[in-house]
Image (cartoon, grey):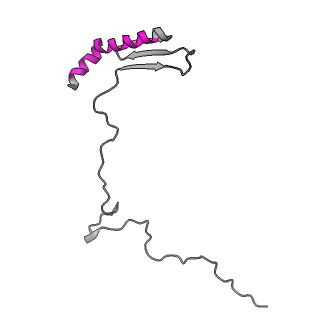
Amino acid sequence: MTTRPHPPLEGHTPTPTGTSPAEPASTRAGSGALKVVAEGVPSSVRPDPHAGDGRRPVAWLHIVAPPSYSATPSARSWCSCGRDIFAAGLVRALTLIDDHNQHRTLCPLLVSQEGKAA
């Protein structure tokens, strides 16, 4: 009985003998430097897209007005100067909203910033 060699498997590719595409190609004129990126691709460091423009929030007003008329609305006023006031109920929340708007005109942190923006 003679044995026959098995036929090659389908899809079998021969081992490459040259350089693989994963190796960096050398630059022209044999300068010795390796080419890192493809031509036409920007490699410079770009500025941070999230960099601020110098402005920052100073005063916040958070109003919660539930869709049901029977639910209790509330409001909270914060400021970087240390102000932190909470009010629950329709009349108190409306009063706090007016008070917050007045505080924005009197707060030393906000008054000094308005002059810089102009």
- The quadrant holding residue 36 is bottom left
Q: Residue at x 49, y 11 (%)?
A: 90
- Taking depth in this image into account, of 6 and 55 the one nearest to the observer is 55
Quadrant of the rendered image containing residue 110: top left
Front one among 94 and 23 = 94
| Residue at (39% x, 20% y) in the render | 60
Q: Which residues are magenta?
A: 93-115
Residue 32 at least partly seen: yes
The residue lying at 51 percent from left, 15 percent from top is 73
Above or below — where is 48 with respect to 40?
above
The spot of residue 106 in percent (x, y) is 28, 11
Q: Nearer the viewer, residue 110 or 100?
A: 100
Image coordinates for residue 9, horizontal then vertical, percent: 64, 78
Q: Is residue 46 above or below residue 69?
A: below
Q: Which quarter shows the C terminus?
A: top left
| Nearer to the camera, 83 or 25 | 83
Q: Residue furthest bottom?
A: 1
Whether residue 16 sits left or right of residue 7 in the image: it is left
Q: Is residue 3 left or right of 76 when viewed as pictured?
A: right
Please determine whether, in this image, residue 12 is positioned above or below residue 61: below
Residue 24, image x and y in percent?
38, 65
Say if 117 sits above or below 111 in the image.
below
Q: Is residue 5 left or right of residue 63?
A: right
The quadrant the N terminus occupies is bottom right
